[in-house]
Amino acid sequence: MPSICHITGLPTVFVRKEPKTYGTSKLAEGAEINGKTVLIIEDIITTGGQVVSSVKSLRELGAIIDSVLCVVDRKDGYKGNLEEADLKIISLFTSDDLEPISKT
């Protein structure tokens, strides 16, 4: 299955929770992000804590970030965290959307 970077033609960066102590020892692996607008893509957002942490680190590296795209929004109180970080969320599905499916 092709990845999002293959479909869109846009570069991809993978973000670690913290840099490894071996290899390249980078927090963000992939394309250059300094001065670039970056969209964060998450599979599931619950509290938004890891997203905010990653965004803070990427902004320190020069990334310009104002939005987060998530596949499933669990709606568990992350909005304050994301608003404080000046982020808007774009959700493909919410947990409410998926609830009827889980009952079949």
Image (cartoon, rainbow, N blue to C red):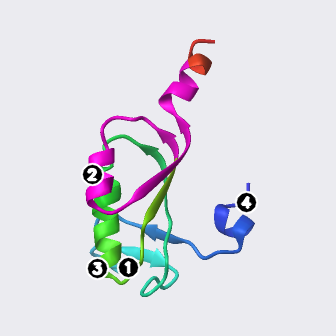
User: What is the three-letter code of the residue carrying label 1?
Assistant: Gly
| Upstream in sequence: badge 4 or badge 3 | 4
Mark 3 and mark 1: span between their CA atoms?
21 Å
Q: Give the range drawn in magenta.
A: 71-99
Mark 2 and mark 1: span between their CA atoms?
32 Å
- Which residue is labeled 2 in the image? 81
| Upstream in sequence: badge 3 or badge 2 | 3
Q: Which mark is residue 60?
A: 3
The image shows residue 59 at horizontal and vertical percentages of: 33, 76
Q: Residue 103 carries which label?
A: none
Name the residue located 59 percent from the left edge and 17 percent from the top edge: 100
User: What is the three-letter code of the residue carrying label 3?
Assistant: Glu
The image shows residue 51 at horizontal and vertical percentages of: 35, 57
Q: Residue 2 carries which label?
A: 4
* Dot in front, 2 or 1: 2
- Residue at disc 3, secondary structure: helix
Residue in front for this viewpoint, 72 or 66:
66
Dots 4 and 2: beta carbons under 8 Å? no
The reply to whether residue 69 is in sight is yes
| Upstream in sequence: badge 3 or badge 1 | 1
- Residue at disc 1, secondary structure: loop
- In the image, residue 63 sits, relative to residue 8, either above or below, namely below
